[in-house]
Image (spheres, coloured by chain):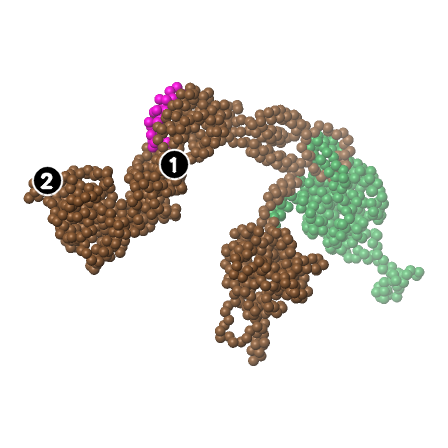
Amino acid sequence: MSADRKASAAAKLPGISAEAATLAARLPSLTLAARRVAESVMHGVHGRRRAGPGETFWQFRPFVSGEPAARIDWRRSARETRAFVREREWEATQTLWLWIDRSKSMRFSSALAPCQKLDRAIVLALALAELAVRGGERVGLLGLTRPMATRGVVERFAEVLAAAEREPGEPLPTAARLPARSKVVLIGDLLSPADDIARAFAALGGDSSQGHLVAIADPVEETFPFAGHTEFLELAGPRRLRAPRAENLRERYLSRWDAHREALRAAAAQRGWDVLAHRTDQSAATALLALSARLEQGG
Amino acid sequence: MFGLPLDFAAPAALVALLGLVALYWLLRVTPPRPREEKFPPLRLLLSLTEKDATPAKTPWPLLALRLVFAACVVLAMAGPLWNVVKNAAGGRGALLIVLDDGWAAAPTWGRRIEAAREAARDATDSGRLVALVPVSRGGEEVSPLDADGFARMLDALAPRPYAPERAAALPAIRSFLARDAQAEILWVADGLELGGAGAFAAQLKALAVGRNVQVAADAETPLAISGVDSATGALSATLTRADAHAAEGGRLRALDSQGRSLGEAEFAFGAGLAATAKFEMPIELRNDIARLSLDGEAAAGANWLIDERWRRRRVAVLSGASADLSEPLLSPNYYLARALQPFAEIRRPEPGAVDPLASLIAEKPSAIVLADMSVAPGPQHDALDAYLRGGGVLIRFAGSRLAAGDDDLTPTTLRRGGRTLGGAFSWETPKHIAPFEAPSPFVGLPAPDEVTVTRQVLAEPEPGLVDKTWARLADGTPLVTAERRGKGLIVLFHVTADTTWSNLPISGLFVDMLQRIVARANAAPGAVAAGAAVLPPRQTLDGYGALGTPPNDAEPILESFDGPGEAKHPPGFYGAAESLRAVNALAVGQKLALADYAGLPRRAGGLETSPPVDLKPWLLLIAVFGFLADTLASLWLARPRGFARAAALGLALLAVAAPSPRAQAQISDPEAALETHIGYVASGDRDVDETTRLGLVRLGEVLALRTSAHVAAPVALEPARDELAFYPLIYWPIVASRPQPSAAAVQRIAAYMKNGGTVVFDTRDALDVRPGGAPTAEGMWLRNLLAGVDTPELEPVPRDHVVTKTFYLLDHIVGRTDMGETWIEALPPRDPNDHVSRPARAGDSVSPIVITSNDLAGAWAADERGAPLHPLTPGSPRQREFAYRSGVNLVMYALTGNYKADQVHAKDLLERLSH
């Protein structure tokens, strides 16, 4: 088969090609998309840049005897007779923690969706990171990186994500602990049982932190456009369901879906977090705009 | 069945169609394979506990498709036959089939036989008897036959080369009808009036009043050749047809006596019933034509056999009168030329020839015409006499010079002085010609009244004059006399060739007479003129127009036989080989006419037969395709995405199902190309092949041990199939009992040798060869093989040949035997100017062929422990070593060519380079 025909076959079968390409291969385009989305949002809402150097430096204070001599900032001390200690007030700055659900169920796109849920999550996360860094805040990937405020944060995150691709993550943030009073944005399809989600949120710690959930869904998951004799397969597990007439399931499934979302909101509300629903056939910029507005609002 | 021409061989199987109803319900409730969908929130779905138990119904197109192909299978099993037509004539009595089997039936013979067979099958299927009357065997009693007897009789029939008289069959038909009151008649007619079709039809109608009589005839009627005219400059054939709507034209082919094509001529009928085809070719070639044959029509009537009568003769004309060009119309030459022109090539002496008669005789004419010229004794006379005795024909005309002269080259003694009739001094009126009588060759020619003779020379009355006379005047005086002289013939016209003595030369009779005389002349004098009155058949045409040995019942013809072929005298060549007489299927000038069936009903469809078509394979094919379509459709319903892959897979499977043999044959090629292999041709004899293989394996080990040549395992080759180009050396042990390889294989071997390969043929027969004795079986086998190969000149390996020097210094090639000779391509002869003593000589290239008889592989062969397999003859201890050395040298020779021969010059070359 010639190369052209292969390519055209792949073009006709987006599911196959999307599965074939690894996340690492897609990341460059995702970072580009993230930057583009971030640009549009910045110009739309912020339109300004906060000045001021030294996010890390806070103040020099006089050396108190008993402290380790290594803390003395000798350059500052040399100008005066006293010794000074350079203090970093980093706990005081806002840190935005991002978490992306990288489980298998995120690697799904139906014929109705332009991309996988995971891709959209990454685009949102990276764009958010870019926005935050430009806004003078620090951003970290929960469980993967420490907070950073470097300009190339998008690329750094992309590298980290690519490196972490080998082990698909958990559907819920379990391993990490949130620092107190931080902002956190959790992006995922959040299909786990509402109880598990609530438990996971509680386990995250980070008292009085401000959180936002982005529940990404494939259009298929929200509309259930199936009919006829259909067998539904799980992405992550071996379970399957054979529905002789899928169309008969639609009503009940949609109400079940709404119930699940409701439970999700309830679980989030327990911690004072809010939920933003996003569908992959919608524009990523819309979601980002809403998200950044909420972040601004929350201070 | 159901008004359709459809019948079933096993109608009981149709009961299975009832099963389709059950199948319908079954298929209806069996859902198609579900479509698979990945769905991440499956957990949510699973929590919806209650299940929908009603399965989806099979889509109706799929259901219909499955029912259709199930029905196809059932119908196929019932053995459906299409086109089983029962003939309308459903009588009770026997069916009498009258079959025209003249040559006119030959072109469509197969269809005629089929038509008869089908009619008979219809009759016998309904329990009736059948009788068959081929019209050529009309005289025989007709008896009813059963199906087998009829088939045997029909199979034995072949068209006859003549047109049998149909009337001969009437008595037999009459008696048959008398015996069976309900008998019906089917006449498979050839469509031509030839053989009395019209009268026969009328008689048949009268015979079969109240019975069912049908004529099965074709719209097509054959073309035929009805004569050949050897006109000036061209041989023209007349063609005839019966139907003005038949084939427009065609092509006539001229064949010589061996059946080789000499030329072709087109003809076109236009709107008429006759056409002419002209062959324009040199006279020598034209005289070689033995037969004209109509392209594309296999019938005796479409062939015209040509014998001496239609050959164009060369006739020399010489007149005693001085060449008077000022009054050409008064010259006898003029009348002779005009009369001879239509059928003969006229030769006149060169103007100013010293001895015109001698020069004309040298041209070997068929006949020499001497107009009023006497031949004086002397060389001229002798030459003419010799010509006559050699079979020439001399035609003389009287005149003043002949009357005055005195020579013996006349059929009869002439009386001095002529006789004048109707002149001023005569009271007799000019005489007319009497009708020709039996021994004369002019019998049958009209004796027109307007021909008068006013003057003639008279023959001396003598015994035998009556027998010599071919034509006489009304009062009985001889006008034309003839006498055999040796093998030749002298014919004397007792009048002049011009109009001074009679007006015969300006009558049509003159032309006819000359033509008959010239026709008696041999095309080339020297051949024996047939004197036998009875000519036995030599070669006869069969109904299809093929020449072959005469049938047993063919009888000889009389020399006077002049008519179309008939049952006793089938068309063909009669008489001695050197003077064949042709009898043709048609008479000269015969016309063909369409048959008039006297209102007998024609069978609808003519000869068209429609054998029943077995629909079983087609139905099964439809079922298979339906099954495939169903499978693909089910796949598509289940997984639209996977469908393309599955379809591609199916197509790939189909492609794999028909693997090309070529692809298999080439599998080993890349391996063969990667290493150096010695090939050997597997003879097919297991022992020999195993010995060869082991021998070559051992030789490979020896090569690896002693030389830098590494050869991989030997490869058994099939020359017709394998690519030979990868093998520098092919060893071919010859087993005489094996069949020769195919011509294609020999061709590939030849190409391999041409392209630089070396084949070592081992006849392994050194012990059987006797010097000067008959070649051995192996030797003959090899000769046959090499007959198709361009083999170079061979010589026994000379002592200084490079093959004896390539690695070891050898005296000769040794194998299991050491006395056999080894042959190799002959080296170019030693340069006589080259006085340098050379230890080795070589040609420009490696010899493509080495033939040995010493069984090399037999000496090399060893088992896995290295122990030799075969004893040696005479078996000196060093012989096996020398056998290995021979092998090493041969391989080295094939690999390095003449390198060693060049190597001996190395010293000289280095010396030259140093200066």
- Can residue B246 be seen here? The reply is no
* Chain identifier matching the green colour in the rendered picture: A
Q: Residue at x 59, y 55 (%)?
A: B681
Q: Is residue B201 left or right of residue A159?
A: left
| Relative to B56, residue A185 above or below | below
Q: Residue at x 51, y 71 (%)?
A: B830
Where residue B41 appears, as percent x and y from the top left, is 75, 38
Amino acid carrying mark 2 in the image: Thr
Residue that numbered label 2 is attached to:
B429
Where residue B572 appears, as percent x and y from the top left, is 36, 41
| Relative to B72, residue B537 above or below | below
Of the pair B626 and B96, the residue shown nearer to us: B96
Magenta residues (range): B189-212
Kindly state the secondary structure of the residue where label 2 is placed: loop
Pointer 1 indicates a residue of which chain?
A: B
Q: Nearer the viewer, mark 2 or mark 1?
A: 1
Q: Residue furthest bottom?
A: B915
Q: Residue furthest right?
A: A66
Amino acid carrying mark 1 in the image: Asp
Residue that numbered label 1 is attached to:
B553
